[in-house]
Image (tube, rainbow, N blue to C red):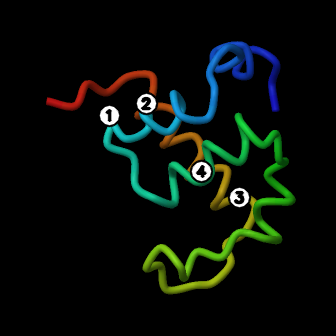
Amino acid sequence: MPKRLTTLFLTTNKDDLEQLCKEKGLNDYETEIIMRIYWKKQSLNFIADTMEFDKFGKVQKYYSLRTINTIHKEAFLKLMLSKKE
């Protein structure tokens, strides 16, 4: 994970990060990925091996590293750019 991204959430605790995700309108699985990366400090490889997406209503149980990376990028952009009205 690039250091420039971790500094954005350095002072954020778990509850603040969850609240930010909720305010920006992230899906449950996007919130879970953000929490695992920025609060639990898990790697994308570990997330790809352990996160079960069927709990969130997705068709597949596991997704590839590339797909999780894409989901993370989209969720990160939602956190930084969108303004939920």
N-term mark: 1 or 3 = 1
Q: Quick one: 39 or 1, which is closer to the camera? A: 39
Q: In the orientation shown, which residue stands out farthest toward the left?
A: 85
Mark 2–mark 1 CB contact (< 8 Å) = yes
58 sits to left or right of 82: right
Q: Is residue 49 above or below residue 33?
A: below
Q: Alpha-carbon distance for marks 1 and 4?
A: 21 Å
Task: Please name the residue that numbered disc 4 is placed on.
Answer: 70
Q: Quadrant of the C terminus?
A: top left
Q: Residues within 10 Å of mark 4 (few under 14, many from 20)?
A: few
Q: Residue 10 sits in which quadrant?
A: top right
- Which amino acid lies under the numbered mark 2 shown in the image of this protein? Leu
- Which amino acid lies under the numbered mark 1 shown in the image of this protein? Glu
Element on which disc 4 rests: helix
The circle on residue 20 is 2
- Mark 1 vs mark 4, foreground winner is 1
- Mark 3 vs mark 2, foreground winner is 2
Q: Is residue 9 above or below residue 23?
A: above
The circle on residue 53 is none
N-term mark: 2 or 4 = 2
Element on which disc 2 rests: helix
Element on which disc 1 rests: helix
Q: Alpha-carbon distance for marks 3 and 2?
A: 25 Å
